[in-house]
Structure formats: structure tokens, C-alpha cells
Amino acid sequence: MINTITIAGRVVADPMINFTKSGMAVLNFTIANNRKYKSVEQTTFIDVTLFGAYAQSLENHIKKGIAIDVVGELIQERWENDGKNYYKYKINAKEIDFRIPKSITKEPYENLEGEFYEDFQ
């Protein structure tokens, strides 16, 4: 069965990196996803985990407040405490895409007139 989820959000806090006994990197962080329902703003917090070399390569790039898209597998964690069952969903990420603000991306493309731009008209 297919288990792929894509969600956009902002990183809530700087990520934490840990290593398994075998030395594999595990990067954990949380994103906040905002949506409106009946004109009421709602926020869902989703834990995200990255593994291995990908986790290490993104450790210094994922920072509090940045907007990202996360693609990965939806995982349900279950545990029992004091006779009660608890459930939590998280994403084991396979891909992270950084959302660059329009204010940054707009400027370099505003002045594309000249030789380069004319080649594509």
C-alpha cells in the first residue's frame, strides 16, 4: 500500500540530532501547519524525523521559523501509560523542500531584460 504524505509548515524550534548505537544520525524537529476552518485559524503540530546522511546534511539548514515542505511516510506511534492507550502521528521524512519567500525570489528575476532574457522570447 502507498503511504506518502506531503505537508507544508514552519519549523517550530531548531532541530535536535542524535545518533543510534550503530552511529546512524537521527534528526528530529516539529513543524506547525496552519489552516482555516469556518474562518477560524487552526494549527497542527507535526513531529518530523530524518535519518542517516540526509539528516546530517540538513542539520545546519533547518532552523526555527523557516517554511518547508515535508514528504515522507505517516507513522503512528502507540504506547500505554497508567492503563491508557496513547497515539501520536509523525512523519519519517524522505524529502525536505525549502520554501523561499517571494521577497527573495522576486528580486533576481525582475530585471531579466537584456541578452539572457531575449534568448528565451
Image (tube, rainbow, N blue to C red):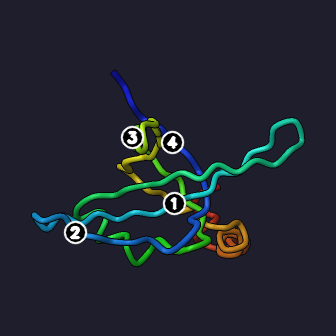
Instruction: Identify the residue at horizontal 59%, vertical 51% (top origin).
Output: 8
Residue 115 x/y as whole percent: 60, 72
**So how many labels did they put on this image?**
4
Q: Nearer the viewer, mark 2 or mark 4?
A: 2
**Viewer-closest of 71 and 38:** 38
Instruction: Identify the residue at horizontal 27%, vertical 58% (top origin).
Output: 51
Picture disc at residue 69 = none
Circle 1 is placed at which residue position? 30
Residue 16 x/y as whole percent: 39, 72
User: Few, some or many C-alpha atoms within 10 Å of disc 1 (few <14, some 14-19, many ≥20)?
Assistant: many
Q: Which amino acid does label 3 sit on?
A: Glu
Instruction: Identify the residue at horizontal 89%, vertical 41% (top origin).
Output: 39
Picture disc at residue 6 = 4
The image quarter containing residue 25 is: bottom left
Left or right: where 6 falls relative to 23? right
Instruction: Identify the residue at horizontal 39%, vertical 40% (top origin).
Output: 80
User: Few, some or many C-alpha atoms within 10 Å of disc 4 (few <14, some 14-19, many ≥20)?
Assistant: some
Counting residues from the start of the chain, the first of labels 1 and 4 encountered is 4
Residue 55 x/y as whole percent: 31, 65
Most extreme residue toward the left, as rendered? 22
Q: What residue type is labelled 2?
A: Phe
Counting residues from the start of the chain, the first of labels 2 and 4 encountered is 4
Circle 3 is placed at which residue position? 80
- Above-or-below relation of 92 to 25: above
Most extreme residue toward the right, as rendered? 39
